Image (cartoon, rainbow, N blue to C red):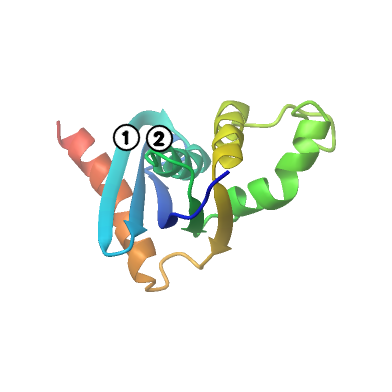
Amino acid sequence: MSSSRRVELFTDGACRGNPGPGGWGALLRWGEKERELKGFEPHTTNNRMELTAAIRGLSALKQSCRVDLTTDSQYLRKGVTEWMPQWKRRGWRTANGKRVQNRDLWEELDTLLQRHDVRFHWIRGHSGHTENERADGLANRAIDEALAG
């Protein structure tokens, strides 16, 4: 895998109710260039939107990259760095034998992680981190625009 291209990816998900209408936002930055992405789901959960933001951000990359992904979601970060390897060994089952929630998204993310060299960074949400606030704004704007018609 050639990962000479370095990209920063900032992601966030939002949900009005949980479950409820949800949005995701992703900010991609490489060098001096930026790209904003956002999307909406009419009935979803916050965790699904956090995963979707990462998936859509990584999917937008046209070639293999080294990615620094910053998220305020412990679910996303720990899911990839701690839980997913064990879920896969157990056939996508948790330690107590239950099916992994959001398996469809975890599997899609896992495929993308094989293509890119991704390092996950966690930051506290709503703490004034500029790029995280932008990703949050994109997610909420996606919800607002969809609900406005």
Residue 106 lies in quadrant: top right
State the image coordinates of residue 86 (x, y, percent, origin top left): 80, 40
Q: What residue type is labelled 2?
A: Gly
Please, is residue 20 above or below residue 7 in the view? Answer: above
| Picture quarter with the C terminus | top left
Q: What element carries label 1?
A: strand
Q: Residue at x 35, y 53 (%)?
A: 28
| Mark 2 residue element | strand
Q: In which quarter of the image is the N terminus?
A: top right
- 119 or 137, nearer to the observer: 119
- First in sequence: mark 2 vs mark 1: 2
Q: Is residue 50 above or below residue 77?
A: above
Q: Whole-percent x and y of residue 75?
A: 60, 49
Q: How crowded is mark 1: few (under 14 residues within 10 Å), some or many (20 or more)?
A: many
Residue 40: which disc? 1
Residue 20: mark in rendering: 2
Tell me the amino acid under the disc marked 1: Phe
**In x, y percent, where is residue 131?**
35, 64
Q: Nearer the viewer, mark 2 or mark 1?
A: 1
| Extreme residue in the left direction | 149
Relative to 119, is 13 above or below?
above
Q: Which residue is drawn at 32% across and 35% down?
A: 40
